[in-house]
Amino acid sequence: LLSDYGGEDIDDNASQGSESSLSLDGLEDDSTGNSDRLHLERLRALCKDLNHNEEFADVIAVNMLGLHTTCGLLGQPKRKDVKPNDVMDFVADAFIKCTAGSDFTLLALDDVHWMDSLSWKVVQCLYERGENLMILCNSRPLASNNLSIDPDFLQNLRSESTTSQKPRFTEILLQPFTKADIRDLLATSLECIPSSIDETLCNSMYEQSGGMPYFAQELVRNLIRNDLLETRQDGTAGLRKELSEDVQKFLYSNINDLLLHRLDYLDSNARTLLQVCAVLGFEFSLSELIMVQCKGRRRTASQIKKIQDGLNTAVSERILMEVFKGGSNRKVADCSQNRRNSEPIETNERSYTFTHAIWRKCVLGTMLKERERDLHR
């Protein structure tokens, strides 16, 4: 929301450190203090337009955005004076104001079943106050007795989605895979027809995954990666017969064990880098990662190349996904192998996300708590 807000009023010298590019020079010139100062000025301008005082802006800056107090503008904000409802109203009002010039705004929310009550209240405010706004929720089936959401609001959303000619709410339910879905997944992965999939393999995959889509996908990838599948003379596709007795070591009782097995195959640089990525969040920028990795040291081309190599490894293993942000466009990059030898691409920001929240949780689980606390500091 702050990326373009009030930018015309900010001194050009201060803004030079706010954007990072994929060139080494651009990354080495990045200044955390300048970036924080720029965002704080924009936040204060936004708060002023929404009738919030400067102290409120400083509390939001420190406690919600994690801006560094070393930027020279923050005093000692009083967090106790800001109530949760104040924050909820501010987030909703800020979103509405910053999207007011759009003809249509799509708010896409993933894994909504994990959302807390305050986040749901923000969504409710946006739904009630916003114009030309559509809310798309991707979640497991939401129960009407879910304590994090007002049941009347949930009922209103679902009622409108089925009765209104122009519904502003769409719910995509994430149902578990059926055995037929597992069969189709195997057939697609092995490039064969579903009827040729061995029944024993299909049953084993279904029991192992419990119908969890991501677990099932990872199990199939693991079997293919270890060359444990074959197409037999009778045309059926299944586990290699000569490996049938040892195949259990390639199947896992839960997805965490499978992901840990995948992490063990990475080199130490990639594993250590992924831990820093996990602490930064589900989504993070390259400039943020470099800032943490090179803290207290002068950034060199070799250090940055090492970081980029680790990221490329994680992307090729489908642990991370690379996204580009620039203007109003955002697209997923095709992370092919020739990217490693290509020239840096100039863009406003290169960002990465974990391909699934389970990956981030798994990586965090491999860290000592002391190490995690040190990185947070």
Image: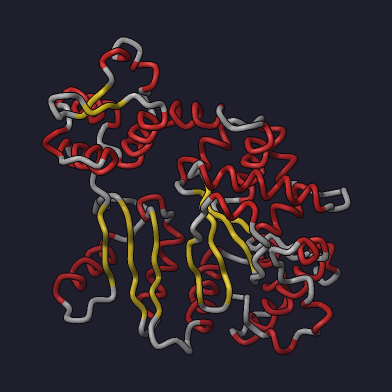
Viewer-closest of 164 and 274: 274
Q: Quadrant of residue 283?
A: bottom right
Instruction: Report x, y in % for residue 101.
Output: 48, 89
| Residue at x-position 35% and y-position 41% | 214
Q: Height in image: 260 above or below 249?
A: below
Viewer-closest of 224 and 342: 342
| Residue at x-position 88% and y-position 52% | 298
| Residue at x-position 26% and y-position 15% | 241
Q: Height in image: 44 above or below 366?
A: below
Can residue 29 be seen here? The reply is yes
Instruction: Report x, y in % for residue 48.
Output: 66, 85
Q: Is residue 177 left or right of residue 107?
A: left
Number of numbered labels in the structure image: 0
Q: Quadrant of residue 286?
A: bottom right
| Residue at x-position 56% and y-position 43% | 314
Q: Height in image: 243 above or below 346?
A: above
Q: Is residue 238 left or right of residue 124?
A: left
Can residue 68 be seen here? The reply is no
Residue found at the far top of this picture: 245
Viewer-closest of 291 and 162: 291
Q: Is residue 150 left or right of residue 85?
A: left
Instruction: Report x, y in % for residue 172.
Output: 26, 59
Residue found at the far front of this picture: 233
Q: Quadrant of the N terminus?
A: bottom right
Its colouring scheme is: secondary structure
Instruction: Report x, y in % for residue 256.
Output: 45, 30
